[in-house]
Image (cartoon, rainbow, N blue to C red):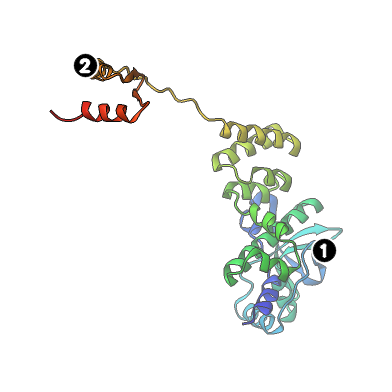
Amino acid sequence: MALGRGLGELLGEIETAYEKNNTPSRSEILEINVNHIKLNPYQPRKIFKEDKLRELSESIVNNGLLQPIVVTKDSGNYLLISGERRLRATKLANIHTIKALVLNVDNDKLRELALIEIAYSYESLLNDYNITHEELSKRVSKSRSSISNMLRILTLSTLSLKMLGDNKISLGHAKLIVGLMEDEQKLVIDSIIGQKLSVRETEVLVKRIKKRERTPKKTLVNKINFNYNSLVKLKKKLNQNNLNVKIDDKYFKIKINSQEDIENISKAFENK
């Protein structure tokens, strides 16, 4: 399979991880008329292969729809969040209704969900085709930094991604906690929810946590007091050879001023 063709096909199947993380209290599954569902304007342009759609359409006819699409209410109709391929295949099969998970989300959240789905699709492309961020950026006409920033969101802990999906934190909050330890992410999220922190206030909290990480912890080192009495005799012997010898904390120092000093040191340490 050509790389370009495969990328286009995969970009046409951006599936959401969000629908795995919804709580029943915030959603319901309904049978919805396919003509009452509008496509998501915040999703990237998609390409769907006719043969793949037909395969899925036949599977839906024979086995039913195994996974509901995800929508949100919009002016008396519904707006698609994820599952466009399933929706198209259902229409192709001349089936007039489709099972849909209905979520209550606003436009800002809809944009965030779309961004999360795009990040998952980027990750899939990188792994499946073993390409670099630079190669992917050329294929999808996005900057390399944009792709890298999107993928960083997916490094969040499972809890953090779930809180983002459940609308407990915003994408702005999520970006700030990328790179923190899992327990630190939970601490920040608890603070965001409990204290209703803004993104700016969260930024201050995260900076404080990172500053604490960079501050080296002072360790108490037990100072050992050595008994140097056994070296006193050697020191006197070296002094008799006009050598400058000093004993201090953890050091036995002999100052060398000439080649003769080296010879005298060597003789002093020779086994008699």
Viewer-nearest residue: 125 or 110: 125
| Residue 247, percent from left and from top | 33, 18
Q: Quadrant of the C terminus?
A: top left
Q: In screen coordinates, is 92 left or right of 231?
A: right
Mark whose residue sits in front, 1 or 2: 2
Residue indicated by mark 1: 41
Work out whether 212 lies above or below 83.
above
Q: Which mark is residue 270?
A: none
Q: In screen coordinates, is 95 left or right of 179?
A: right
Work out whether 89 lies above or below 214.
below
Residue indicated by mark 2: 233
Work out whether 158 lies above or below 253.
below
Amino acid beneath label 1: Pro
Q: Quadrant of the N terminus?
A: bottom right
Q: Is residue 262 visible?
A: yes
Q: Quadrant of residue 246?
A: top left
Residue drawn at point x = 65 percent, y = 57 percent = 151
